[in-house]
Each structure stands twice: as C-alpha cells, then as structure tokens.
Image: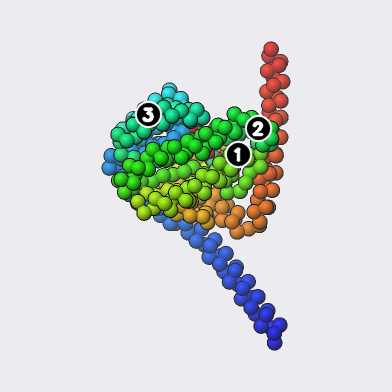
Amino acid sequence: MVNCNTTTVFAAIGVAYIGYKLLSLLKTVFDVYIAKGTSLKKFGAGQGSWAVVTGATDGIGKEFALQLAKNKFNIFLISRTPAKLEAVAKEISDKYGVETKIYAMDFTKGDALDFNNLSTQLNAIRVGVLVNNVGVNHDIPTPFVEEDDSVINNIVEVNIKGLMKMTKLVLPQMKANRGGLILNMGSFAGLVPTPYLSVYSAGKAFLSTWSQALGMEVMKDGIVVEHVNTYFVVSAMSKIRKPSALIPMPKDYVASVLKKVGVPCGANVPFTSTPYPMQGLANWAINNVFSRHFWVKQNNNIQLDIRKRALRKREREAAAARKTE
Ligand SMILES: NC(=O)c1ccc[n+]([C@@H]2O[C@H](COP(=O)([O-])OP(=O)(O)OC[C@H]3O[C@@H](n4cnc5c(N)ncnc54)[C@H](OP(=O)(O)O)[C@@H]3O)[C@@H](O)[C@H]2O)c1
C-alpha cells in the first residue's frame, strides 16, 4: 500500500515536471513565432525622436541604424571611422529621408572629452532609443594568462565602461520624458561562460546582470531596458560569412529584435530577449536540457577548435609574408 502511494506520488511529480517543461517550450515557440513586441511608436517612432546607435557603421549596428530610420526615427550614429559614418548617414537620409547626426570616437580611449561633447549633443535632441551595440572581442580564443593587457583593457573600456557611460548620458532625459528604449547587445557568451574568451564572456555577463537591475530601477519611469541575448550573427566580429538556420544575417537578426521588444523568446531572466527564432529555441534548450557544466564544456571544446584553426591560419600568413620578403 505504502509502495503504491509512493509510486503514485513520484509519478505525479514526474508528470508535473514534464508538463511544466512542455508548457515552457510551447510558450517559447509562441514567443518566437507568434507574439508581437511593443510597438516602436511607444518610443517616439515617427514623432521626431532620435535613435542613438553605437558601433553604427558595420554589422549589427549598421542594420539597427537603417531599420530604425525605416521606422522613422532620426538617427545619431557613433563609431570610429569618420568616412564610414558619413557614408552610412548619407545612405540613411537618401533611403529614408530622416535627419542624421554623426560623432566619431574610439571607445577604447574612454576619453572624457568625447563623452562631454556627446552629452551636449544628445541633450539638444529628444532621444527615444539608445542601442548600446559597440563591442570588442579577443582577436582569437586565447588562454587568459597569455592574453595581452591591451586586449583586456579594451574589452573593459568598450563593453563595460562605454556601455554605462552612454546609458548615463540619455537616462536623465528619458526619465524627464517618461519614456525610452535602451537595447543592450548581449551574447550567449554571457549566458554560458566561454573559456578562452573569458573577459568578453564575463563582460557580457556583466551586461546581462546590469541590464536586469537597471531595467527594474527605471521601469517606473516608463523606460524599457532590454538585454538582447545573441548567438552568432554573420559579421566582421564573428568572422562568419555564411548564414544558417541558427546564424542569421544582421538584417534578419535586427528585424527580429525590433519585432520582439519586451518578449522573452526563450530567455528565462528578466528584461532579456533572445528574439531570433532558432536562437530563442537554443536558449530554451540551454536552460532546460543538460547541466550548465555540460554547456561550458561544449563552449570549451568549440573555442579550442577555433583557436587551433586561427593559430594555423596565423602560421600560414606568417610563412607567406616571409616568402614575399
Ligand atoms: N556578431 C556576432 O556573432 C555577435 C554575437 C553576440 C553578440 N554580438 C554583439 O553585437 C555587437 C555588434 O557586433 P558586430 O558583430 O556587429 O560587430 P562588427 O561587425 O565588428 O561592427 C563593429 C562596429 O563597431 C564599431 N567599433 C568597433 N570598435 C570600436 C571602437 N573602439 N570605438 C568605436 N566604434 C567601434 C565599428 O566601427 P569602425 O568600422 O569604424 O571600426 C563598427 O561600426 C557587439 O556588442 C557584439 O559583442 C555579436
């Protein structure tokens, strides 16, 4: 009798557990394929508001600039190379007829003068959206003990300090205007620790935790903070050239971000979205299948493989350079 009851209790717990997992999978499928995000009109689209995009001349950042312009935001582009900024600004105003402004700066320098100049310029416009997109990475997967101090400092300066400084520049006016959207470009490297990219990975974990804390702080002011959890996207940084089901082109990736503002799509922490469908499902799998230790080990093996190939490529390039000397 006791045995029968115990078996029934365990069976009920098992069914409840599997039911809960199935429901959360169904919710993720609904989120990524059907649910609609918050309209960009809430943040001033088509009403003379500006979207500020960092790292706006290439990859994901350039797509944010183009697609936010298509949604009738004026665009403030920030990046390193003046000629590229001018070209993207022209492309935007030719295509979409919105206003543009550009500011050239190198975030690795962390120059106070740049942030003062930006402060003056941003206070003169109404900022509806900030896309904290600029980010730098290790050149190739490298053991922490061997990594150059300059690489470590650049990641901290751009991915952590730059992120916070940019946000502080726009928050007061968003608070006064009782609205705004801050998109922080995160990475799966922040979700699952990534050996050999340890500083980048930890920086993205910082971005995740900080976005969640800040999101809660400013929610009462009508400001939406969203940590955008991203797997690979075709770009110069990822060094991936061909898209696949899991790895989109920047255009498709950014379209999914802007369509799903406020929808978790597989993320299970607050103020976070993993908007690209296959990546949202991958996020669900990481949260629900196997242990975190398993996923860290997978990352370890992937990065070791990438490192091996990158070192071989360096050797080939060095040999070719010696031949031409
Ligand atoms: N691509 C991926 O697979 C992936 C995955 C997860 C997360 N992310 C995140 O997404 C964001 C964008 O990545 P991405 O792949 O689009 O990068 P990307 O293609 O390398 O584009 C970099 C952009 O940032 C600018 N930039 C680079 N260093 C800068 C600096 N020190 N100061 C000012 N501007 C600088 C570049 O300007 P110049 O052209 O003038 O140098 C360019 O406009 C990053 O935060 C990254 O961590 C990317």
* Amino acid marked by disc 3: Asn
Query: In the drawing, what numbered circle is on residue 147?
Result: 2
Q: Position of residue 31 (x, y in %)?
A: 47, 57
Q: Quadrant of the N terminus?
A: bottom right
Earlier in the chain: of badge 3 and badge 1, it is 3
Residue 227 placed where, x, y %?
48, 47
Q: Are marks 1 and 2 in contact (CB under 8 Å)?
A: yes
Q: How many marks?
A: 3
Q: Give the mark nearer the N terminus: 2 vs 3.
A: 3
> Residue 83's quadrant in the figure?
top left
Helix, strand or loop for disc 2: loop
Mark 1: secondary structure: helix
- Badge 3 marks a residue whose secondary structure is helix
Residue type highlighted by circle 1 = Val
Contact (Cβ within 8 Å) of mark 2 with mark 3: no
- The residue tagged 3 is 117
Q: Which mark is residue 199?
A: 1
Question: Which sits in the foreground, 124 or 310?
Answer: 124
Give the distance between the C-alpha atoms of the residues marked 1 and 2, in whole angstroms: 10 Å
Residue most extreme to the left: 47
Residue ranking furthest to the top: 325
Q: Tell me if label 3 and label 1 are in contact, CB under 8 Å.
A: no
Left or right placement of residue 51 versus residue 155 in this view: left
User: Measuring 34% from the left and 46% from the top, which residue is drawn there?
Assistant: 175
